[in-house]
């Protein structure tokens, strides 16, 4: 790992809210393990970092983000394949997509090592702690509003979520959002007529309660049934000459 004094000027320390979160690591086979993740730093690298590294071609031009954190096995079981504990962590971009975790070899141009290497022990025993670092990549120009850990591994499964906000990230993500009542362009791809323009206006957003879902015949898993529904009303306008 590079010493702090050797950080290139192109690197930026992102103001992630550090600290520990007790989470559940879901391993392959759906076995669960109790761990504590303590985020220590998040550094945005530069596109140049990827030019000297051996990575897949589609990742060229992406911007690496180096996440350093500590993992503690707080449960009573040994964790198999400790290097997979970070698999439930997600770096969330302001384009509403998750960063891609990558494993790179080689180094930056000039032979300088990349600052991030997964140094997890093979099988962390109960009580074991270790520091490690993983690399996530995002497209150039995309900011980071938050880092999250999802117990199920996928945000759309409704599992317990731990969040580390990145200061200023939510503001950056919200900058391009339309205010309620403002009409925005929406494109709808139809099999018959191709792409149609349907201007949309957000009318209202109302928070419900978990009790609203009780007794309804919905295809929801257990975690989703414990969730809170939101009711979103949108007005669409057909500006074309045909009925839809």
Image (cartoon, rainbow, N blue to C red):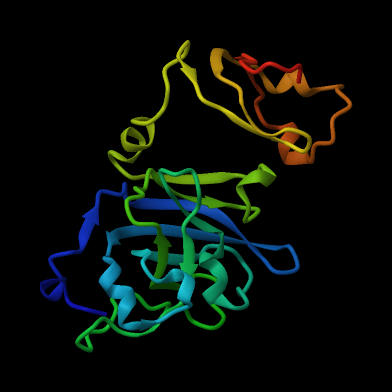
Where is residue 137? Give x, y as percent: 41, 63
Quadrant assignment for the C terminus: top right
Image vertical order of residue 118 relative to residue 136, above or below: below
Where is residue 179? Give x, y as percent: 42, 17
The residue sitting at 20% across, 63% down in the picture is: 11
Q: Is residue 55 toward the left or the right of residue 4 in the image?
A: right
Q: Is residue 195 toward the left or the right of residue 176 in the image?
A: right
Image vertical order of residue 77 relative to residue 200, above or below: below
Residue 41 in sight:
yes
Residue 49: image quadrant is: bottom left
Image vertical order of residue 1 relative to residue 62, above or below: below
The residue closer to the viewer here, 31 or 190, is 190
Where is residue 36? Give x, y as percent: 48, 58
Where is residue 226? Give x, y as percent: 71, 32
Quadrant assignment for the N terminus: bottom left
The residue sitting at 53% across, 62% down in the picture is: 74
The residue closer to the viewer here, 73 or 195, is 195
The residue sitting at 41% across, 58% down in the picture is: 138
The residue sitting at 55% across, 65% down in the picture is: 87
Residue 198: image quadrant is: top right
The residue closer to the viewer here, 219 or 161, is 219
Q: Is residue 97 toward the left or the right of residue 77 in the image?
A: left
């Amino acid at each position: 790992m590079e010493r702090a004094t050797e950080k290139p000027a192109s690197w930026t320390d992102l103001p992630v809210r550090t600290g520990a979160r007790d989470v559940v690591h879901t391993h392959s086979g759906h076995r669960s393990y109790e761990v504590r993740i303590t985020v220590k730093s998040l550094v945005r690298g530069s596109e140049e970092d990827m030019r000297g590294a051996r990575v897949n071609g589609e990742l060229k031009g992406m911007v690496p983000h180096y996440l350093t954190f500590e993992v503690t096995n707080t449960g009573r079981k040994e964790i198999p394949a400790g290097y997979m504990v970070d698999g439930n962590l997600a770096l969330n971009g302001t384009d509403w997509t998750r960063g891609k975790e990558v494993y790179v070899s080689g180094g930056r141009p000039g032979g300088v090592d990349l600052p991030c290497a997964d140094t997890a022990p093979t099988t962390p025993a109960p009580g074991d702690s270790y520091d490690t670092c993983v690399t996530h990549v995002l497209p150039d120009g995309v900011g980071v509003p938050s880092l999250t850990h999802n117990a199920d591994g996928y945000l759309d499964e409704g599992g317990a979520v731990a969040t580390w906000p990145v200061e200023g990230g939510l503001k950056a993500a919200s900058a391009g959002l339309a205010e309620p009542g403002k009409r925005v362009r929406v494109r709808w791809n139809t099999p018959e007529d191709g792409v149609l323009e349907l201007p949309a206006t957000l009318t209202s957003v109302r928070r419900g309660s978990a009790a609203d879902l009780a007794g309804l015949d919905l295809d929801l898993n257990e975690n989703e049934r414990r969730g809170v529904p939101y009711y979103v009303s949108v007005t669409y306008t057909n500006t074309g000459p045909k009925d839809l």
